[in-house]
Image: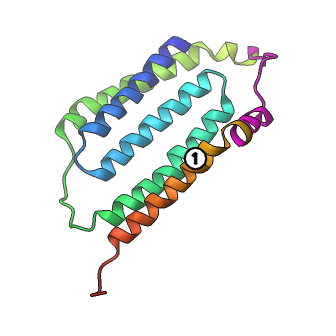
Amino acid sequence: MHLILFVIFAVFALAGAANLLLQTHPINSALSLIVVMSSLAVLYLMLGAEFLAVAQVIVYAGAIMVLFTFVVMLLNVGREEKTHGSRAAKVVGFPAVAVLLAIVASILLKAEKHFGAVSLSDGITTTADLSRVLFRDLLLPFELTSVLILIAILGAVALARKDNGA
């Protein structure tokens, strides 16, 4: 069961990454990146890292992607062309989603009797351990990343601001 779910979400992550590179519109690329981040969160969850999975969804798929979308919308001030979607996405996408939902449903129905047998092992990393590593051992990279994100946002706002002759 874990192997099938791993393969499904690994394929989602790879397909999202490929779509990220192939898209010409930046908003569609940002949406593909959300698919990648969400798939990684499920993979973390399967590894037993529940805290990292929730942090992946909240921080990356939520907050950072909102910032990316905000910056892209600030920089992309031209008119957008309206499209009716990809024909390949309609022909391949809808049956693929139906097959995927059927596989996940069958796996969950077969594994329903094993849901009560889950137990925690002794080697679990606690939130205190994670915070100790993040805020003591990796404090400089953590702070540098936040400063770089702030500089990127300020740069996008400065580029998007219209010059009024000054």
Left or right side of 17 for 137: right
Q: How many marks?
A: 1
Judge whether residue 61 is colored magenta: no
User: At 36% across and 34% down in the image, what residue appears?
Assistant: 16
Residue 26 location, x and y as percent? 30, 51
Q: Would you say residue 128 sits in the magenta stretch?
A: yes
Q: Residue at x 28, y 63 (%)?
A: 76
Q: Residue furthest bottom?
A: 165
Q: Of 9 and 147, which appears nearest the observer?
A: 147
Q: Is residue 102 visible?
A: no
Placement of 42 over or under 2, stated as above or below: below
Q: Which of the 4 image quadrants contains residue 55?
A: top right
**Residue range (magenta):** 117-135
> Which residue is the extreme one toward the front?
140
Q: Is residue 111 toward the left or the right of residue 85 in the image?
A: right
**76 or 105: nearer the viewer:** 76
84 to the left or right of 27: left
- Residue at 37 percent across and 27 percent down: it is 14
Amino acid carrying label 1: it is: Val
Q: Which residue is mark 1?
A: 59
Q: Which part of the image, by quadrant, shows the N terminus?
A: top right
- Residue 123: give x, y in percent of width and height: 78, 17
Identify which residue, 50 or 153, lies in the foreground.
Answer: 153
Q: Residue at x 54, y 52 (%)?
A: 63
Q: Secondary structure at mark 1?
A: helix
Among the 4 quarters of the image, the one containing residue 127: top right
Q: Position of residue 114 (x, y in %)?
A: 68, 13
Q: Quadrant of the C terminus?
A: bottom left
